[in-house]
Image (cartoon, grey):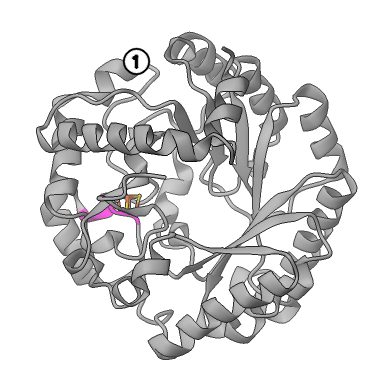
Amino acid sequence: MNNRLIEAVRTSRFTRPFLEPYRMARNRWIHRKILNGESIPIPKSIAFEVTQRCNLNCKMCFYRQHKTEAGLKELTIKEIGFLFREKLSENGFRNCFLTGSEPFMRNDIEDIIKIITNEGMEISFQTNGTLITEERLKKIFESSNRIALIGTSCEGFEMVHNRIRGRSDAYKRAMKSLEIFKKKGISVNISVIVLDENLKDVVKLPALLVDYSVNQIDIGLVANYNDDEVRKSSLITGFDSDEIHTLVSEEIEYKNSLKEIQKTFYKTIENGENRGLKVVFSPALLNKCFEGIFNRNIREKCLLTCAGFFSVRIAPDASIIHCPFLRRSFGNLLDTSLETIWNSIEFREFRRKLLVSNMLPTCTRCGKLRELSKGIT
Ligand code: SF4
């Protein structure tokens, strides 16, 4: 069976309920292995950070505070070809999520997509939408019909969106990209981070976005932390604090009450339902434990895990890291095999520490946070 067929069967709403018990049993098996410090299978998904450059300066983005890494080496197109054709082709990867910072900062993103889809993988990507043009999309879709999902963002109406995103034409450009997606018949997912600043706008987003080709709107809380949470996370992992790239900002923390913020989330869902537009919480665990995530005491209330265990994350220089926020390199694919890196003693021990500690203080508002008992979805 080819990758596309497997993926279609795996994600179909008809087969998903039947596969669910198998998926959960497998996830429990993997978690037991992690807790025992054993090797785990290499996942079938890749998250590839093609660059750490970005043309925006968003208030809720952790990259803003970690500019030093913006100078991090980026792979050339030749090296990316080598990576995907020579180093990763044996692993049967099904999909690759392209991320950055902003993937479209790379002038050769279209060629990168071609290389990866030629290896049989489906591509998803997340973009801020400001660099999308008809020509670029045309080139991508001409060279490949394996684009599975496109994610972009909208933080509110023009004034608010521009202020949050730190650029005066960010909204116009993002809306233009939504028009282009619509014209080409491409559906997109929209991510929104709810802040005090966009509270009034967020509830109206379904009305704004229903006129575009939007699959669903994902809404989440801002993931900001303080120095103490970074220090404690550093103690648990043994990572230097500059290897923990979270947003440290008290300024952006909610002044509105939990009740007010929660009301915004539910109202946005309701407004979406009224317009036939799906609005979902990110992470889904917010549905069950909004208060625990909002108040950052979710680690005391729930047995947790992380979606990062189920995806191979490749940094712009081909280092293997666990997630966007924990930047310790466990090895570099240019000189070491994925098999060696993925189950190295250091990587296994790191995963074990995460589960034993019920994740980190700097995980509590992360969109990749999951409930362990339910497994990963
Ligand atoms: S839950 Fe924690 S370990 Fe997992 S992706 Fe988020 S910050 Fe990283």
Residue drawn at 73 percent across, 77 percent down? 157
In the rendered image, residue 47 lying in the magenta stretch gets the answer: no
The amino acid type found where label 1 is placed reads Asp
Report which quarter residue 210 is drawn in: bottom right
Residue at point 72%, 74% (across, down)? 274
Number of other residues with Cα within 10 Å of mark 1, as a class: few under 14, some 14 to 19, many 20 or more: few
Q: Is residue 358 left or right of residue 154?
A: left
Residue 282 point in image, percent of width and height:
47, 61
Q: Secondary structure at mark 1?
A: loop
Point out the image quarter for the C terminus.
Answer: top left
Q: Residue at x 72, y 30 (%)?
A: 110
Which of 97/160 is in front? 97
- The quarter holding residue 141 reads top right
Residue 109 found in image quarter: top right
Badge count = 1
Residue stretch in magenta = 241-245
In this rendering, the answer to whether 5 lies above or below 230 is above
Residue drawn at x 56%, y 66% as measured from the top left: 58
Where 355 sits versus 219, above or below?
above
Q: Position of residue 259 (x, y in %)?
A: 42, 89
> Magenta region's main secondary structure?
helix
Check disc 1 and report the residue beneath it: 335
